[in-house]
Image (cartoon, rainbow, N blue to C red):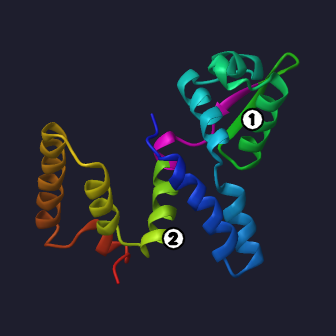
């Protein structure tokens, strides 16, 4: 399950459309950006593993009221953007994931952090903790993750993966 806030996705769409200076770069970025509804459709395909338009439409909550033709349009867009691929089965297209959900989470998150926080993750974490808070169990989980990261950094000679990738200022 991808846990990306709707507001964050909308911000990404806005920032991609307004902050890119090279029109060709903007087209590439805009083409890869997922709208909230596209993400919802992609999740269904990821959950099912592969699906026809009808299977995706049937898997959506009835209260969404998305018809067959709209689902088909979203699936085609996702294929055009490189998130899905197809194979033929008789007259039907079977849609399959072309990328793993984790890759999409990384792409969306990295773009979000780059656009809103100038590439720095710490202000995002601070904002989320201040704005949403954490339960004791979540704090324990976070501490375990931080301890693991610290151990990996120390075994790598005190240098984080982020620094190795050249993502620090």
Is 100 covered by the magenta stretch? yes
Side of 71 where 117 appears, left or right: left
Side of 103 where 40 appears, left or right: right
Decide: few, some or many residues near mark 2? Use Cα within 10 Å; few <14, some 14-19, many ≥20.
some
Residue at horizontal 44 percent and vertical 76 percent from the top: 118
| Residue 52 vertical placement versus 71 (above, below) | above
Decide: few, some or many residues near mark 1? Use Cα within 10 Å; few <14, some 14-19, many ≥20.
many
Residue highlighted by disc 1: 75
Question: What is the residue that sits farthest to the front in this orientation?
Answer: 131
What SS does tag 1 mark? Answer: helix
Mark 1 or 2, closer to the camera:
2
Question: Where on the picture, by quarter, is residue 58?
Answer: top right
Residue at horizontal 71 percent and vertical 50 percent from the top: 81
Q: CA distance from mark 1 to mark 2?
A: 27 Å
Q: Where's the C terminus, which quadrant?
A: bottom left
Question: Where on the picture, by quarter, is residue 1?
Answer: top left
In the rendered structure, are the residues bearing label 1 and label 2 in contact, judged by CB atoms less than 8 Å apart?
A: no
State the image coordinates of residue 56 (x, y, percent, origin top left): 68, 22
Residue highlighted by disc 2: 115
Which stretch appears magenta? 94-104
State the image coordinates of residue 91 (x, y, percent, origin top left): 88, 18
From the viewer's side, name the closer residue of 127 and 104: 127
Side of 126 where 80 appears, left or right: right
Residue at horizontal 61 percent and vertical 35 percent from the top: 40
Q: Which mark is residue 46?
A: none
Going from N to C along the chain, the mark reached first, 1 or 2, is: 1
Is 50 covered by the magenta stretch? no
| Residue 119 vertical placement versus 110 (above, below) | below
Question: Where on the picture, by quarter, is residue 31?
Answer: bottom right
State the image coordinates of residue 4 (x, y, percent, origin top left): 47, 46
Residue at horizontal 57 percent and vertical 32 percent from the top: 43
């Amino acid at each position: 399950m991808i846990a990306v806030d709707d507001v964050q996705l909308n911000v990404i769409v806005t920032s991609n459309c307004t902050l890119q200076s090279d029109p060709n770069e903007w087209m590439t970025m805009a083409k890869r950006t997922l709208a909230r509804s596209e993400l919802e459709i992609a999740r269904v395909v990821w959950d099912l593993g592969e699906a026809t338009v009808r299977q995706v439409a049937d898997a959506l909550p009835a209260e969404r009221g998305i018809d067959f033709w709209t689902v088909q349009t979203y699936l085609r867009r996702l294929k055009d953007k490189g998130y899905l691929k197809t194979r033929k089965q008789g007259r039907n297209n079977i849609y399959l994931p072309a990328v793993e959900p984790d890759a999409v989470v990384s792409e969306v998150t990295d773009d979000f952090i780059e656009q809103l926080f100038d590439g720095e993750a710490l202000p995002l974490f601070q904002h989320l903790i201040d704005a949403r808070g954490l339960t004791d169990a979540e704090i324990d989980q976070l501490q375990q993750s931080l301890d693991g990261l610290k151990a990996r950094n120390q075994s790598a000679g005190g240098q984080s993966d982020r620094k190795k990738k050249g993502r620090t200022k």
